[in-house]
Image: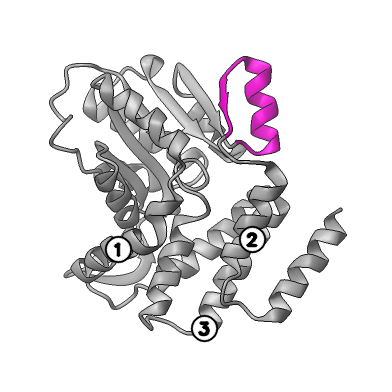
């Protein structure tokens, strides 16, 4: 249901929607296009505007920090963090969140776009190819990022809304793992794309179903399992981080901004335990 919902809610950009070429590129967002988790940056922006409490943002910060410290994406932890973040929008109007998202992108997301990935995106655009974002983040956030980068459109998790007001529930499940592959497959059928001639980019082994769909899969800022898999199959590999440990620590610091000292201490203790 998540893949079908994402494909049915996809918006096709006017610039490339009439392109005759049947090729396209699909980009994951978090840590592939953007440093860190887009939903967390959005949640922080909402917190600054007093949409929810400090307790809520501390929990979201901890979930994000845990993911970055360990360096492995735990689907259950990601699901909990993102579903919690989606619940924050319950009762708000769709147009309100769209306007808010534009402002939050400018203040908290624009400078986090990886320049190297942005250059890869531009290569596809220069070839006249369609470029889509495919993310577990809410589709409204994904659309804003896609629009600002001049992309064709975005596939993301669909939040239910009735009469223009969010209910705090999802349509289907999170667009994660195999659901991303289903969404891409449905979009390809809808847009007449030849997946064997398409490219896909991600940092996470969890996106292997989507990467395996296309003829040109690429690993960007990859986690350990994806990096090993990509190298074994001769996939293209890119890493735009200055260093794995430095990147993790930097993201940890950003994620924990505004969190209580106790949470920081717990994070350090957890990292030592994992070592």
- As helix, strand or loop, the secondary structure at mark 3 comes to helix
**Mark toward the start of the polypeptide (2 vs 1):** 1
x, y percent for residue 170: 38, 61
Residue at the image point whose x is 57% and y is 19% from the top = 235
Which is nearer the eye, 55 or 114?
114
| 64 falls in the magenta region | no
Q: Quadrant of residue 59?
A: bottom right
x, y percent for residue 43: 43, 69
x, y percent for residue 203: 56, 38
In magenta, the rendered stretch is: 222-239
Q: CA distance from mark 3 to mark 2?
A: 18 Å
Residue at the image point whose x is 41% and y is 53% from the top = 111
**Residue bearing the label numbered 2:** 252
- As helix, strand or loop, the secondary structure at mark 1 comes to helix
Q: Which mark is residue 101?
A: 1
Name the side, left or right, on which 238 lies relative to 25: right
Name the side, left or right, on which 120 lies relative to 54: left
Q: CA distance from mark 2 to mark 1?
A: 23 Å
**Mark toward the start of the polypeptide (1 vs 3):** 3
């Amino acid at each position: 249901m998540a893949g079908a919902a994402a494909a049915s809610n996809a918006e096709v950009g006017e610039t490339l929607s009439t392109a005759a070429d049947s090729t396209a590129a699909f980009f994951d967002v978090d840590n592939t296009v953007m440093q860190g988790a887009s939903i967390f940056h959005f949640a922080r922006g909402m917190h600054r505007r007093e949409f929810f409490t400090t307790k809520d943002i501390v929990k979201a910060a901890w979930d994000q920090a845990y993911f970055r410290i360990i360096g492995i994406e735990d689907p259950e932890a990601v699901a909990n963090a993102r579903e919690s973040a989606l619940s924050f929008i319950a009762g708000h109007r769709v147009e309100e969140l769209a306007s808010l998202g534009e402002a939050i992108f400018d203040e908290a997301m624009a400078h986090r776009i990886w320049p190297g990935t942005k250059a890869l995106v531009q290569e596809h655009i220069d070839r006249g190819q369609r470029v889509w974002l495919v993310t577990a983040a809410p589709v409204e956030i994904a659309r804003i990022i896609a629009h600002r980068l001049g992309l064709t459109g975005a596939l993301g998790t669909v939040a239910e809304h009735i009469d223009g007001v969010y209910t705090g529930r999802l349509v289907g499940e999170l667009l994660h793992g195999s659901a991303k592959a289903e969404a891409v497959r449905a979009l390809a059928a809808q847009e007449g794309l030849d997946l064997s001639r398409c490219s896909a980019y991600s940092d996470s082994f969890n996106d292997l179903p989507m990467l395996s769909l296309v003829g040109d899969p690429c690993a960007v800022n990859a986690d350990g399992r994806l990096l090993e898999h990509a190298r074994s199959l001769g996939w293209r590999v890119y890493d735009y981080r200055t260093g794995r440990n430095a990147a993790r620590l930097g993201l940890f610091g950003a994620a924990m901004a505004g969190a209580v000292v106790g949470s920081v201490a717990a994070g350090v203790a957890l990292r030592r335990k994992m070592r």
